[in-house]
Image (spheres, rainbow, N blue to C red):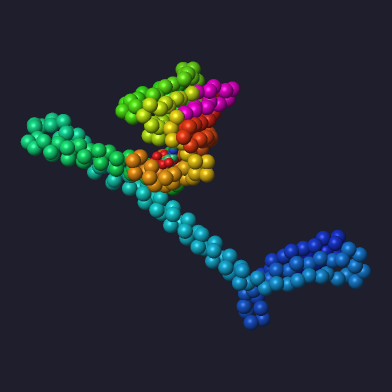
Amino acid sequence: EKLRISTDRALEKGTPFDLELRFVTAKSNKKWVRIIGRTKSLDKNNKVYGIVQDISTIKAYEASLIVAKQKAEKANRSKSEFLANMSHELRTPLNAIIGFSEMMEQQLLGPIGTEKYLDYISGIRESGTHLLDLISDILDMSKIEAGKYELDLEDLNISKSVQLALHMMEGRAHEAGVKLSLDNQLAESLKIRADRRAVLQILLNILSNAVKFTEEGGEVRIHCKDRSDYIVITISDTGIGIPANKLPQVTRPFEQVSASYSRDHEGSGLGLAITKELVQMHDGNLSIESTVGVGTTVSVRLSKVL
Ligand code: ADP
């Protein structure tokens, strides 16, 4: 029927056609054919010229690819869901390890006899905290991938969030010998529709990278722009920079620019991927500019509540 309509139209209007048809052969085999046809413009003989190609194998291959893709997507979803659901199970024991080692470090219930043990306890606490950070990143990424990261939106005073993030990073910047400063402040009355925790996470992730990848004596600056319907928060550092050809990959999960960096700058390689996803969940935009040896500038653009 399809073929008849197409040939009729071809004869009437001279329009060529390209069809894929399925049929069952006399021996009950299911077949796919592709029929390409056209007429000569002034064909008096009412003839359609064309080719018929058996595409059954291609079709079968296509179908198996679709099934394989669906299977892979399902497996990936199950993995993300599994990890997202593990959140509680992984964090609870780790928090116990961290909490008890802090108590012991401070010798809250009495002195620890052997000095060396105090070192070990600090080691346990630091490793525990580091592990908790990694797990938190993996869980956040899984939640985002499983579509389970839910934003708790409010009209947020973004100026306050920026100041809080700055405040929270001051200690680390000081330890690293990096100068951390805020160029200008946004108006207190300026509000964005956003999730408070996610915005803080976005700012802290970018700031901690900026401090982490800047040498002693370097500088990290936060600059805010207030435009008619959006704001831009820019965090620039005078750090090691990211090679241009590596820029696209730093916002992809588990990617770190150089294995040698990750030795002294431990991280999950998820921070920027999570940050980008979180910004996009807010209908915002994250962009990175960088020059090796000069520094990196990360800008986050978010819509204002008007
Ligand atoms: P990580 O956990 O490794 O910090 P991120 O996703 O936060 O993971 O960053 C990915 C990689 O991008 C980092 O390992 C680093 O190589 C590079 N990077 C991110 N921010 C900066 C920066 N401000 N300066 C230089 N390199 C950076």
Q: Is residue 224 above or below residue 57?
A: above
> Residue 76's spot in the image, x, y percent?
44, 54
The magenta-colored residue range is: 224-237
Q: Quadrant of ligand 1?
A: top left
Residue 228, percent from left and from top: 59, 22
Indicate the quadrant where residue 96 lies: top left
Residue 88: image x %, image y %? Answer: 30, 44
Q: Position of residue 103 (x, y in %)?
A: 17, 33
At 78% from the left and 67% from the top, the residue drawn is 37
Image quadrant containing the N terminus: bottom right
Q: Is residue 48 left or right of residue 66?
A: right
Check the image and report above or below for 197 versus 96.
Answer: above
Q: Residue furthest left?
A: 113
Count of marks placed on residues: 0
Residue depicted at 43% across the width and 32% down the height:
239
Residue in front for this viewpoint, 294 or 99: 294
Q: Looking at the image, can residue 176 be seen?
A: yes
Residue found 83% across the figure and 69% down from its top: 48
Residue 225 belongs to the span the image colors magenta: yes
**Foreground residue, 158 or 151?**
158
122 is within the stretch colored magenta: no
Among all residues in the image, which is located at the extreme bottom?
27
Quadrant in which the C terminus is drawn: top right
The front one of 250 and 178 is 178
Task: Name the residue: 28% across, 46% down.
Answer: 89
Quadrant assignment, res 240:
top left
Query: Which residue is nearer to you in this view: 261 or 207?
Result: 261
